[in-house]
Image: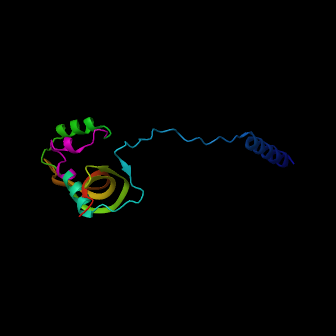
Amino acid sequence: MFRFYLKIIFLLMGITVVHAAEFRDLRPIPTPVKALSQTEEEIKDLPPVSEEAIKTGLKSLLASWNTSRMEKLLASEFYDRDRLLDAMQTFPDRGAKLRILAIKDVQILGQRVLPVDKEHVTRVSTVSVNALTQIEFEDPVKGLVKLEGENEYLLRIREHIRLYP
């Protein structure tokens, strides 16, 4: 009989806890929206960016890794830009190389068109590239070390397009 009353007490405690819960309103977190300037036009239908432009951009970025050219390629709004550049200067092996093993996924995140003149425009595409990469460096104890990893790279590709061929 005691077990019966104990079960009823636990059941009532559970019911009161459920009734005491409240629901919260889901409110979106406000974020700043970058307004397009009067010279920019957003493209609704995303035309493809050439594979060659994407490969060239990624190869250029990875070739500049661990060199002073990297500073010119990183956007000013790149998160912890100065910290990355400082860390690359203090990296013990200046001969380390970063190579592309395979490009897995490519996705266009956004595009806009900047008019240059009546016959030309510049298309600026923000592209996400998932690539399998490998860093190679000489370790004094282990010799040549190769480390693979899959990384996502965000590229901003500028293409100058002639409107009337």
Q: Residue 35 in the image: x percent, y percent?
A: 41, 41
Q: Does the magenta stretch include residue 62?
A: yes
Which residue: 33% across, 57% down?
130
> In the rendered view of the protein, which quadrant contains the C terminus?
bottom left
Q: Identify the image quadrant of residue 79.
A: top left
Instruction: Name the residue nearer the viewer: 39 or 83.
Output: 39
Q: How many marks?
A: 0
Q: Residue 126 in the image: x percent, y percent?
A: 33, 52
Q: In this view, does 70 lie to the left or right of 80?
A: left
Q: Is residue 19 left or right of residue 31?
A: right
Relative to 132, residue 82 above or below: above
Instruction: Name the residue nearer the viewer: 79 or 56.
Output: 56
Highlighted magenta segment, given as a residue range: 61-77
Q: Residue 112 in the image: x percent, y percent?
A: 35, 51
Which residue: 42% across, 56% down?
44
Q: Is residue 155 left or right of residue 6?
A: left
Residue at the outermost front position = 118
Which residue: 21% across, 35% down?
86
